Image (cartoon, grey):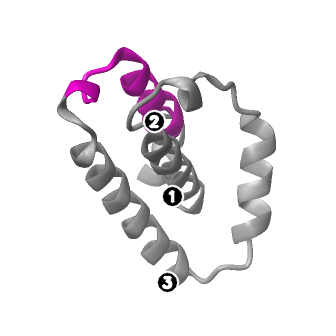
Amino acid sequence: MAHLAAWNWRCVFLLDAARNTDWPLKAEPDVEGLSREFYKERQHWSWLEVQTDFCRAHQALIRTLQELPVERQDNPLILKTVGDEALKHYINRLPTLKR
């Protein structure tokens, strides 16, 4: 859950920076490096901290998507970013979450 929240926060940051331009969305992240960094930051968090952060990150992502200018909401690069930065991580973690 902490991993998913961290990637959601990253997606929120990117989308917020991309309200009027695609340039922040064109960078290729070091996925493994960022995942390690996110783990190091959160490894000692309590379950309550993880849950709270996850809920806040999810809400922030939904709100950020809704607040994008209408002409940006179906931009292919924005949709790809959401897929890469958020949805892909959910799909990869789904078996673990089910357990």
Q: List x then y, in percent, for residue 52.
A: 44, 77
Q: Indicate yes or no whether the magenta region holds residue 76.
A: yes
Q: Which mark, by number, is residue 32?
A: none
Disc 3 is placed on an element classified as helix
Q: Amino acid at mark 2?
A: Ala
Residue at image x 25%, y 30%? 73
Residue at image x 45%, y 36%? 18
Mark before the other along the chain sequence, 3 or 2: 2
Q: Mark 1 vs mark 2: give the one in front.
A: 2
Mark before the other along the chain sequence, 1 or 2: 1
What is the magenta range?
A: 71-89
Q: Mark 3 vs mark 2: give the one in front.
A: 2
Q: What is the spatial separation of the Cα atoms under label 1 and label 2, in whole angstroms?
A: 20 Å
Residue at image x 43%, y 19%? 77
Q: Quadrant of residue 83?
A: top left
Q: What is the spatial separation of the Cα atoms under label 1 and label 3, in whole angstroms?
A: 13 Å
Q: List x then y, in percent, for residue 35.
A: 72, 47
Mark before the other along the chain sequence, 1 or 3: 1
Q: Which mark, by number, is residue 5?
A: 1
Q: Which mark, by number, is residue 18?
A: 2
The residue positioned farthest toward the left in the image shown: 70
Can you identify the residue that label 3 sits on?
A: 48
* Residue 78 versus residue 66 in the image, above or below: above
Q: Mark 1 vs mark 3: give the one in front.
A: 1
Q: Amino acid at mark 3?
A: Leu
Disc 2 is placed on an element classified as loop
Left/right placement of residue 61 relative to residue 33 reads left
